[in-house]
Amino acid sequence: MNLFFEKLTNPSISHVEVLNRWDNDLVLIPLTRPNQTKEALERRESMTLDDLIQRLVHHHTYLIYLNDKLVGEMNFTVDPSHLYKKDPGTAWIGIAIGEPEARGKGIGYKAIQFLEEEIKKYGLHRIELGVFEFNTQAQKLYRKLGYEEIGRIENFTYWQDKMWKDIRMEKYLR
């Protein structure tokens, strides 16, 4: 397995097309985007190249490649307003393995370890993330990597005809 990561510094239309495909993937939407209603869950979004360029102002974005194919994306931003615990100097992380053939292969585990090292390079020592209550596979991964639950936000996202909690987790880097 030839796995590597690359910081996205020069976005292109092809990046936008892949990210738009993943952002509208019926499997990924419930896992990556909070939705308050069934209508929001069914909404499709489309970003432009300008949108992606603007996003890179605040998000450090890294592309995940498996055997030279783009299969996922991860990012972090510093001190966003939605932190559960407002500790200055906190990185909020997100990850999506967009291509189905890349899921369940341990790529997320290695990707987050890489992202943690990048976050340390920025002098940050705390990471926070949110994972939806029904996403037990991701919760298991984060616990395995040393993340601990710090709180839950009720009625955070809609999926399978009900509202679910957002579980907030943190990790202090050494």
Image (tube, rainbow, N blue to C red):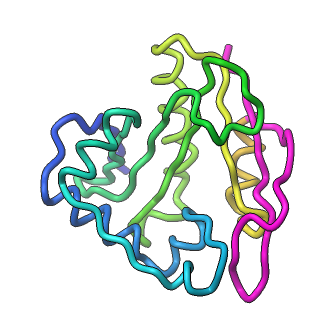
Task: Give the position of the C terminus as an image quadrant.
Answer: top right
Residue 25 to residue 161: above or below: above
Residue located at (82% from left, 55% from top):
153
Residue 165 to residue 5: above or below: below
Q: Is residue 46 left or right of residue 72?
A: left
**Residue 135 falls in image quadrant:** bottom right
Residue 53 pos. (x, y %)? 23, 43
Asked if the stretch drawn in magenta spans residue 97, the answer is no
Residue 60 to residue 68: above or below: above
Q: Is residue 15 left or right of residue 76?
A: left
Residue located at (46% from left, 81% from top):
43
Main structural element of the magenta stretch: helix, strand or loop? strand
Query: Along the line of sight, which residue is nearer the eye, 131 or 65?
Result: 131
Residue 88 to residue 10: above or below: above
Asked if the stretch drawn in magenta spans residue 167, the answer is yes
Residue located at (28% from left, 62% from top):
47
Residue 26 pos. (x, y %)? 48, 81
Query: Along the line of sight, which residue is nearer the eye, 37 or 22?
Result: 37
Residue 41 pos. (x, y %)? 56, 80
Residue 89 pos. (x, y %)? 61, 18
Residue located at (80% from left, 67% from top):
155
**Residue 171 falls in image quadrant:** top right
The magenta stretch spans which residues?
A: 146-174
Q: Is residue 59 left or right of residue 90?
A: left
